Image (cartoon, rainbow, N blue to C red):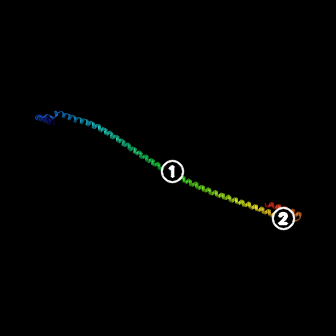
Amino acid sequence: MLAQAANAAEGAAQHGEAAFYTDPTFWVFVSFVIFVAVAGKTIFRVATIALDDRAETIRKQLDEAEQLRREAKEMLAGYQRKQREATEEAEQIVARAKAEAERIRARAEEDLESTVERREQQAKDRIAQAETKALAEVQAMATDVAMTAAKALIVKNLKATGANKLVEEAISELGDNLH
């Protein structure tokens, strides 16, 4: 390739043209190409490292985001479970409260029935006592009336002093025995 370049230079010199490598523009171009190649390689290496670092950072952020998403999902599941448990517990509390209220109502009803029965029995007992007392009073009055009537008849029919005394004793004993 150098030989061809030399031949080309000689041919150009014979035609009155200068060789291309003697032109400063050529050497600026060659320098620029070498600079771009060296700088490009370095820049490419630095850019590759920077992009790799950036990719690693993004990968870490994605992993962290995935971990956070899993944790959030677990927390959500935990909170949903706790909410279900709280709802179930609230339902159980309401059911127990209803059962307790029903038990209290039934007991109050039983207590009311027993109180009514007891008061009814007390009223019957008082009525029976009042009947017994009234009957005793009626019997006492009837006895007193009968004794008074008997006494009046005996006194009217018996005129003798001894008979009166005997009748009075019998009547007084009769009154004591009846009461």
How far across and down, in percent of the image, does residue 131 sit?
72, 61
Which residue appears at 52% of the width and 52% of the height? 94
Instruction: Identify whether 142 is placed above or below 88.
Output: below
Q: Nearer the viewer, mark 1 or mark 2?
A: 2
How far across and down, in percent of the image, does residue 171 sit?
83, 62
Q: Is residue 164 rendered to the left or right of residue 9?
A: right
Q: Is residue 18 rendered to the left or right of residue 80?
A: left
Which residue appears at 33% of the width and 40% of the height? 54
Residue 5 — which label?
none
Residue 90 — which label?
1
Amino acid type, mark 2: Ala
Which residue appears at 78% of the width and 62% of the height? 141
How far across and down, in percent of the image, does residue 28 sit?
20, 34
Q: In which quadrant is the C terminus drawn?
A: bottom right
Residue 152 — which label?
2
- CA–CA distance in space, label 1 to label 2: 90 Å
